[in-house]
Amino acid sequence: MVTETAFMQDSLPPSLAGMSMSQEFLSHILGAIYDAALDEAGWVTCLEAIRAGFSANYASLIVRTETAEDVGLIVSAGNDQPNLDPGNPYIAMSPFAGMVPDQLVTIGDVISEKDWRASTYYRSYCEPQGVFHVLAADISTRNGGIYGLRITRPESAEAFSRAEIDFCRLLIPHIKRALNLHLSINEDRKVSTLYSHAMAQLMVGVVVLDQDRQVLECNPAATAILEMKDGLRVVGKQLEASYANDNRKLQSLVRDAMVHAPAAKPSMSEAMSVSRPSGRLAWGLIVQSISSDQWTEGKQRPSVAIFLRDTEGRVDPPVRLAQQLFHLTPAETALAIQLANGLSLEEASEVLGIRRNTGRAHLRSIFSKTGVRRQTELVRIFLNSVAWLSDTD
């Protein structure tokens, strides 16, 4: 019985079998593919490994084709090819356009050599770059995207052999999985960034501690609070309260949360206030355990989340959004923001440089447009609006 290793070694062309063992090349190429899934910069390394393995002059991944609204994007590995290129207007003329997804083809599978040489795509785009032999596959992803894999050789080189074509077919499912994995990771990062941004805009600080109670991550709002060193600070990578009594309680809450963190149970939350040496209002603080799954192990494992809120922090929403939400004029919006920050009508008028009578007129108009009757109601609906979730003006 012929072993799989022996079959692969015997059937691979010299460019692929030149490695000391065929398994080594397969391990190398698959490692490059899955490394690319974790970091998009790795796609260049991945394509270079494919290019070298197939003795190709180029290996490219068409991420986006050019449209009227988008210049497109091609990631390439080649002797004289930039790693990142905008799309080109000739791709729409390619004989590979509209292929069945996830199927590997060569030029001969889609067009005759005579028609290939006569095509505008070949004469205007491929021939000047020394591209004649082509392996092509359009790889579909779970979000409906199509990524075009192209491996090419010049006319002076041999056409791709059957063994090379078969080997490339083995790689297509792995590239497809890597692309899907990359999409999932990128989506998770975007969602995490969005949540972090929303929390920061709402002036909620988030500090994440690992299993050793060391600070693993802080969002912008938490970083700003800790940089004040006014009641809370980071000492030796651990979060501490300035006053001994507060610190003992904080560390006790963190320890209790650690006990609950490994269990796949609803998170435990406890609250406390932290006094500030400046004499300003105390910080509000919640400690919450983060339940880990069965596979989570090792260092820097998220175990505890600490939420902080600056009750005295000023709010400054984008004026344009506040105007759109409440149909206010710029002057009315400016007054409403000052009132939401705790100023009286007289104080807000002084800050804005307007007369008290003008301020009262603005306030009456604001009441009419928002449907409220008291200043406290106005502050409540303003603070509870979605305007604070954006940082664009």
Image: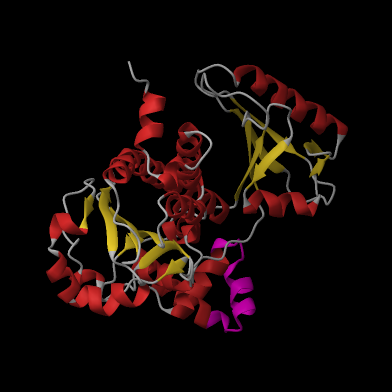
Q: What is the quadrant of residue 170 in the picture?
A: top left
Residue 221 vertical placement versus 23 (above, below)? below
Front-lying residue, 42 or 284: 42
- Picture residue at 73% right of the left edge, 48% below the top: 281
**Rendered-image quadrant of the N terminus:** top left
Looking at this rendering, what residue extends furthest in the right direction?
Answer: 244
Q: Determine whether, in the image, residue 50 is placed left or right of residue 116.
A: right
Residue nearer the viewer, 39 or 201: 39
Give the extent of the magenta segment. 340-357
Locate residue 374 relative to residue 280 in the image: left or right.
left
- Nearest the viewer among 153 and 265 is 153
Residue sitting at x 75%, y 39%: 274
Which SS type dominates the magenta stretch?
helix
Number of on-image labels = 0
Q: Judge from the rendering whether residue 309 lies leftward or rightward of residue 78; answer left or right.
A: right
Q: Residue 369 in magenta?
A: no
The answer to whether one can see residue 310 in this image is no
Q: Where residue 26 sits: x, y (%)? A: 45, 37
Name the residue located 24 percent from the left edge and 78 percent from the top edge.
123
Residue 347: image quadrant is bottom right
Q: Position of residue 162 (x, y in %)?
A: 26, 44
Question: Residue 341: in sight, yes or no?
Answer: yes
Instruction: Pinpoint residue 46: horizontal percent, then vertical percent.
Output: 47, 50
Pinpoint residue 234: horizontal percent, then vertical percent. Answer: 79, 42
In this picture, is 310 found above or below 378?
above
- Identify the image's colour scheme: rainbow, by chain, secondary structure or one colour: secondary structure
Q: Is residue 343 magenta?
A: yes
